[in-house]
Amino acid sequence: MSQAPTVDLAEEFMERRTPLQRVQSTLHRYPYLSPLIVLVVAMVVFTLLNERFLLPTNLSFLTQQSVVIGTLAIAQTLIILTAGIDLSIGAIMVFGQMLMANLAVSVTASNVLPIAGQNPALSIVLGILAATLAGAVNGFLIVRFNLPPFIVTLGTLSVFTALTLILFKARTIQGPEIPELLKWLGTTVKIGDFQLMYGVVLMLILFAVFAYILRNTAWGRHVYAVGDDPVAAELSGIRVKRVVFSVYVVAGLIMGIASWVYIGRVGSASPNADPLINLDTITAVVIGGVSLFGGRGTMIGTLIGTFIIVVVENGLALAGLDQAYRVLAVGILVIAAVAIDQWIRKVKT
Amino acid sequence: MFNRVKRGRGFAAIAAVGALSITLAACSSGSEESTDAAATTEETAAAEAPAEGGGTVAVTLITKDSTNPFFVAMQEGAKEAAAAVGVDLTVGSGKTEGDDQGQIDLIENAIAQGQAGILITPMSVNVNDAIKKARDAGLYVIALDTPTDPPDVVDITFATDNCLAGEAIGQWAAGKLNGTKATIARLVIFNDRMVSVDYCRDNGFLKGMGIDIKDLTVMGDEEATGKYTTGKGGDYEIVCLEATGANEEGGRKGMETCLSKNPAINVVYTINEPTAFGAAEALKAAGKTIGKDVFIVSVDGGLAGVEAVKAGEIQATSQQYPLLMAKLGVEAIKTIADGGAPPSNTSADGTFFDTGVKLCTEEPMDTVTAAEQWTAQQCIDNAWG
């Protein structure tokens, strides 16, 4: 910024830029480029450290380990694009999953709730509906009372966690008690040595669908506009509050789908499943080049960000490092990603 | 005068509940903790009334979490015993495995309320100071399931001999291997190697196989390759020691990491059955046939776990009796509060009150000497959860 006065005006018209500025502007145009480079470099390094890293079996584990974070990160991306944030994302997923499992569990299992024994398909639908409703609650509180999303979802994080424990008696529904349909997304098909999980296919479809919606529909463009500058969006005729509310509802729907994915992935439903997954989704989104200030970022970036988290954890584990170092590495990546985001926001267009 | 005091206390309790519900809405990650703490206050408020009759004994049960069926069973056992002998029971837990602070808060609450005793499954050495404070304040503290480190931090421990439970499955594994090479995966709770239930089961398992474990309290200090000596004996190779948090998700992810390191794993030690279920999912997804290519051993003996033994998903598990631990614990504190004698140690080494262990398997092995072997059906009939 400070070099601006020394720049010759004519030179600016000729668009002569230093190599660094060119990098900056390229990154600005394609925000998923820097995470993509990180992912590729990480994969090369981990392959050099342990040749087992690139084996098809390990790659299939990588995709399977990314499935829950990835699915939830789609919801988190939509919300962060509106300059919001959702801390309750994991709590809502766990609520949906516990509702599904408690509805579908056989009445012959010990210690079940009176709601048990429902049709498995109906249970899944009701679980997804409950999560959608939970998302709507977040959206309503944010839009109707003008409350900051951080505070609202901090509150609902506690509320939904508590409701899960109170309503479902804090009981883990274990694998053998759960009907197959609920675990169906955990089924894998063999492609050579690679095991493709149905849940992974579903996640990739969701990424593609929402990438398309964001780029090519009015609603998608409105989401960007609202996040970039709500005042300008309002002035240009976008009903900002309605868009923000709809984003939280859609995010809730995706969290409900993630509930089903989670049961498939883990094979059981536990009320304190993955308590830090809300932070993992934010990490994935941020590493993926989505700006926390809203209005900028892509679904493909988030997908890459998700893979980076999983690849770093798995790669360092194969390299023989303790868990603490894996957590450390992810932390450093987050800070680097935010620093890069700040830098490319200063691009001269 | 007496009435005024009572009313004052009532108001205090109501204020406390109010304050806690505010905490509940505002607290970020301590949600479960708040719920439990709130429940604590309510129960105590209710407990004030019968106190007028004089001599009501109040006890707090603090588990590691409130979702693992093992701890749920413990809570059930305690509630049954409390109802039977007339004890006012408060139940609470840490937020998840590893939440020391949640347990410390609950201990302090019990002290503040002047309760007669605490039953606790200690999370780690970090709760020791709080336990000492409680004993200094005159509370009788019983450790359930997990001994404290050192064990004399509490008055007495009611537990499964976790080392023996581990030894039994190790002896079984060696018998099952019958001289063939063991390629071992170990799925533990933490890899900070400080929790007694963790190192005792894990190193007990290795010891049962006849592998030199060096220091019992340190996991992972044994040789990575060598010979096991139990039964016919043979070569062994340890592939991994992965932290899982003792749940399904951690079990699956840990097993996946181990399989990536070495797909030839044929023995899987798991800290408990939820971890074993997660590991089984990963093994199946990797195309392994459990019981044929690989076998899984575990410790716990929960209903779903022993049913899995019957179904061939887990090959052997050591069953313990949490309901009994909690029941005996509540009864012991009631007895002491009424002026009776405290319980004394019954375990082989005289350091704790042993509540017993059985090895559940459909394939009994001659190599097992650490525990009596039961069929899956016998274990199902005696299972918790």
Image (cartoon, helix red, strand yellow):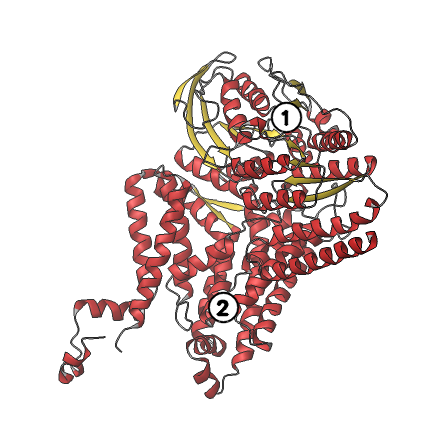
Name the residue beneath numbered marker 1. Answer: B160
Residue pictured at 58% horizontal, 57% vertical: A91
Q: CA distance from mark 1 to mark 2?
A: 49 Å
User: Which residue appears farthest toward the front when viewing the image?
Assistant: B1
Residue B160 figure quarter: top right
Q: Is residue A71 above or below residue B147?
A: below
Chain to which mark 1 belongs: B
When asked about the image quadrant of residue B7, the answer is bottom right
Under mark 2, the amino acid is Ile
Residue A131 rendering spot, x and y as whole percentages: 62, 62
Question: Do the residues marked 1 and 2 share a common chain?
Answer: no
Asked which quadrant contains residue B67, the reply is top right
Estimate how packed mark 2 is, as few (under 14), some (14 to 19) or many (20 or more) residues with alpha carbons within 10 Å: many
Residue A100: tell me if it is visible. Answer: no
Q: Which residue is pictured at 25% across the width and 68% down the height?
A: A24
Of residues A87 and A246, which is closer to you in this image? A87
Which residue corresponds to the image point at 78% horizontal and 53% vertical from the top-left?
Answer: B5
Percent coordinates x, y for residue B114 in the rendering: 70, 42
Q: Residue at x 49, y 52 (%)?
A: A67
Q: Residues within 10 Å of mark 1 (few under 14, many from 20)?
A: many
- Residue corresponding to mark 2: A79
Task: Check residue B342 in the rendering and tell me which mark sits there, or answer none.
Answer: none
Q: Secondary structure at mark 2?
A: helix
Residue B155, image x, y percentages: 64, 28
Position of A3 relative to A336 (above/below): below
